Amino acid sequence: MTTIASVLARGLDTRAAVIGTNVLDQTGPTFAAQFPGARAVIVADGNTWAVAGDAVAQSLAQAGILTDEPIVYPATPTLFADDHTVDDLTARLGATDAVAVSIASGSLNDVTKLSSHRNNRSYLNVCTAASVDGYTSFGAAITVNGVKGTQECPAPRAVIVPLDIMAAAPTRLTATGYGDLIEKIPAGADWIVADELGREHIDDDVWGLVQGPLRDALADPVGLRKGDLTAITKLSEGLIMSGLAMQVMGSSRPASGAGHYFSHQWEMEGLGREWEPPLSHGFKVGLGTVAMCALYEQFLKLDMTRYDIAARLAHWPSPQADEARVRALQSNPVICEASVIASAGKYVTSAHAEAWLHHILDRWGALESRVASQVLLAAVVEDMLRQVGAVHHPAQVGLSLEDLRHTYYQAQTIRTRYTSLDTLQELGLLNTVVDSLFAPGGYWHTRPTPED
């Protein structure tokens, strides 16, 4: 199996990863090796400073690193990764020539990543929880003018991964990392669909970086909930490898599929943002994973031998009709305009529709076989999320089944990246498949409320 060290040797943005227990004292020596002669400034929030701030500051001092006054954001309310926060930290870093040492998990790491890039610097990150794969990923997930997207920027030059600190983190954070990682299963299926149809070919090397360690990293949800060090180590390595795969690929395709789009839709709508702490990205992604695995079960039951291409062509939407469909789905004006642009970017014109439908049918057998070997049953994923303590039913986050049903359609509109939702929309079967999930006997019809 490919190791993290062998991936780092490829000359990526991230050049060093110190992983183990009791490794906070390696922050200073690692910083000195990666940023010789540079000053440092610690960026943290009240929570992350409490668990690692003093140790990181001491390690930097013992290594002879000159440091600025730390930048410590309040512990509450939880920092939000939006353009305003990025602007604030960009200005604060711009007032010094110091290199950031972020003590951070998801949001603060992303903010530091983009703010450092805007100041033409790299940075070092000290991980505090196994909660995201963004530690080592290319790009930062930032909400700009109400629309969440990935802002291009390099990954950190180095990461310190203190497994003992991560194992002791609140179980909520571990569960959110689990939810983020488990979406790689249907995301892999989405990439298979795109590959089989010639929309975006799979890089076998990058595929192995994510999918190789994935099942093992997810294998012990009970142990993760208990803070078992072995389980945390595997989850952390899976998350880090996922981030490195995005660096190698130069995009989030290896690690993000339509299950993430459920989360992106809800995040842009502000779902759970008023809570403290806010509803995490990984919890929403985990729910999106269950939703997509349920959809794939119906996807694999489709009998395409009787599919009527002529009937579909007779109802092929014009660009204007497709835009009207998107606008009807997205009531939020900001999300709507972004979705109109994204959907137009993958719209198949009527001149190409017949050839495209024939192509889908020609590749269906191979596509079906490959997808079947990748996905898990939705009930299995739901149980795994339940065991780790993550969200697994819409009612747990204040969503009705009708809300979830609507999100299946919205998720198809918000990104240009090709997924199985697009295949079904092009075939005119998305309504049929989604309806089956909520009809009597369908997956969500049999689960009106979450099981304890």
Image (spheres, grey):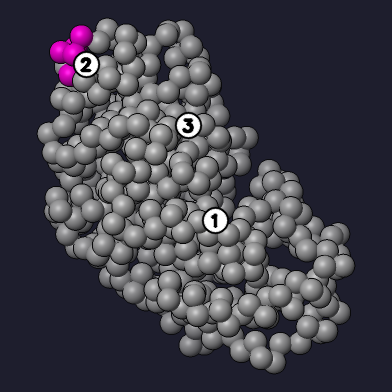
- Identify which amino acid the numbered label 1 is placed on: Tyr
Q: Residue at x 61, y 80 (%)?
A: 364
Left or right, 415 with respect to 123, comes to right
Place of residue 293 in the rendered image (x, y in percent of width and height, measured from the top left): 46, 71
For label 1, the residue is 261
For this rendering, which residue is in front, 81 or 253? Answer: 253
Is 342 located above or below residue 127 in the figure? below
The verdict on residue 60 being magenta is yes
Which badge, 3 or 2, comes first in the chain's sequence?
2
Which of the two marks, 3 or 2, is nearer to us in this view? 3
Q: Secondary structure at mark 1?
A: helix
Which badge, 2 or 1, comes first in the chain's sequence?
2
Left or right, 336 with respect to 122, comes to right
Q: Which mark is residue 154?
A: 3
CA–CA distance in space, label 1 to label 3: 23 Å
- Identify which amino acid the numbered label 3 is placed on: Pro
Whether residue 368 is visible here, answered yes or no, is: yes
Place of residue 8 in the rendered image (x, y in percent of width and height, measured from the top left): 34, 38
The residue segment tinted magenta is: 59-64
Q: Secondary structure at mark 3?
A: loop
Q: Which mark is residue 60?
A: 2
Q: Which quadrant holds the N terminus? A: bottom left
Q: Secondary structure at mark 2?
A: helix
Other-residue count near label 2 (Cα within 10 Å), few / some / many at <14 / 14–19 / ≥20:
many
Q: Residue at x 84, y 60 (%)?
A: 319
Q: Residue at x 32, y 21 (%)?
A: 34
